[in-house]
Amino acid sequence: MTDLTPVLSVEGVAKTFTLHLQGSQVLPVLQGVTFDVPRGACVVLGGDSGAGKSTIMKMVFGSYQVERGRIALAAGDRTVDIAIASPREVLAARRDAMGYVSQFLSAVPRVAAIDVVAEPLVERGSDRAVARERAGELLERLSIPERLWELPPATFSGGEQQRVNIARGFATERPLMLLDEPTASLDARNRAVVVEMIRERLRAGTGILAICHDAEVRDAVADRIVDVSAFAPERQMVPA
Ligand SMILES: Nc1ncnc2c1ncn2[C@@H]1O[C@H](COP(=O)(O)OP(=O)(O)OP(=O)(O)O)[C@@H](O)[C@H]1O
Ligand SMILES: [Mg+2]
């Protein structure tokens, strides 16, 4: 039986930032944000710089508080509303139901690249040797030379760090994947590999929410583009 419930359903979400350093002025950024990410589909957030794309991503991942609305994430046979979930529930939802490939790698110092990639698998109970083997396959696929695997990624090039980050994000399989500019500093060959990896996940039923300025990659993976500019409130600074 096919499950037609979307993996992610965002309804009527609003976000206002309070600028504490500027006399508690409030900056309304988003209102009425509504869209679904169906299983096996890739939804790309589009719209101008400053429209609120990264803000939406951070609210879905539970890093930013949600002021109003609902962010329903299908986690196994339960649905979690990230907008009102406790920090503990957010952490559980991340572990079980959503992966996030951030724009930049923030690796723990002195941890070898292969262990950075293997870590999410070990965290979820995989045997360390098995996890490292899987990590090696991903690093190889993303053309990270084997001589770098045992080195910490801190000194790697921007593109190498991003590929380690992608390998880490793809190490585990979760129902929802969030991708923030996954191919920004990659060459054409590695971009094509990432597109292929994204398509494989979509075929396996993963729902993907992505920010992606590269038109070629976007056209290759997007099933739908959500124009975030459409959710702009009246841009007025209101004293609190
Ligand atoms: N933590 C924050 N505190 C205050 N304002 C913020 C914060 N985060 C984002 N903003 C503001 O919210 C608006 C949307 O920012 P956001 O980073 O979501 O835009 P974006 O669509 O991702 O842009 P870009 O394409 O440039 O990455 C901007 O005006 C930004 O200054
Ligand atoms: Mg952004």
Image: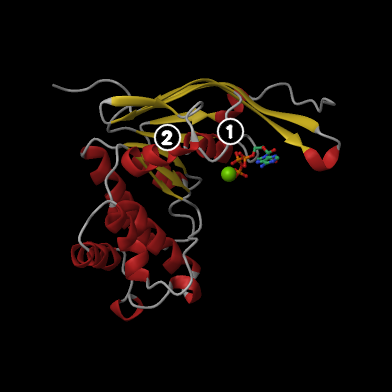
Q: Which residue is mark 1?
A: 65
The kind of secondary structure element at disc 2 is helix
Q: Which residue is mark 2?
A: 89
Q: Position of residue 235 (x, y in %)?
A: 75, 26
| Total labels drawn | 2
Tags 2 and 1 in contact by the CB under 8 Å rule?
Answer: no
Q: Height in image: 193 above or below 213?
A: below
Mark found first going from the N terminus, 2 or 1: 1
Residue drawn at x 65%, y 25% is 232
Viewer-proximal residue among 209 and 154: 154
User: With 214 as the anchor, is 67 left or right in this view?
Assistant: right
Instruction: Report the amino acid beneath label 2.
Output: Glu
Q: Height in image: 58 above or below 191?
A: above
Asked whether the viewer can see residue 189, the reply is no
Viewer-proximal residue among 148 and 48: 148
Q: Position of residue 103 (x, y in %)?
A: 50, 53
Which quarter shows the C terminus?
A: top right
Q: Position of residue 111 (x, y in %)?
A: 41, 71
Quarter location, residue 176? top left
Instruction: Report the amino acid beneath label 1.
Output: Gln
Quarter of the rendered structure image containing ligand 1: top right
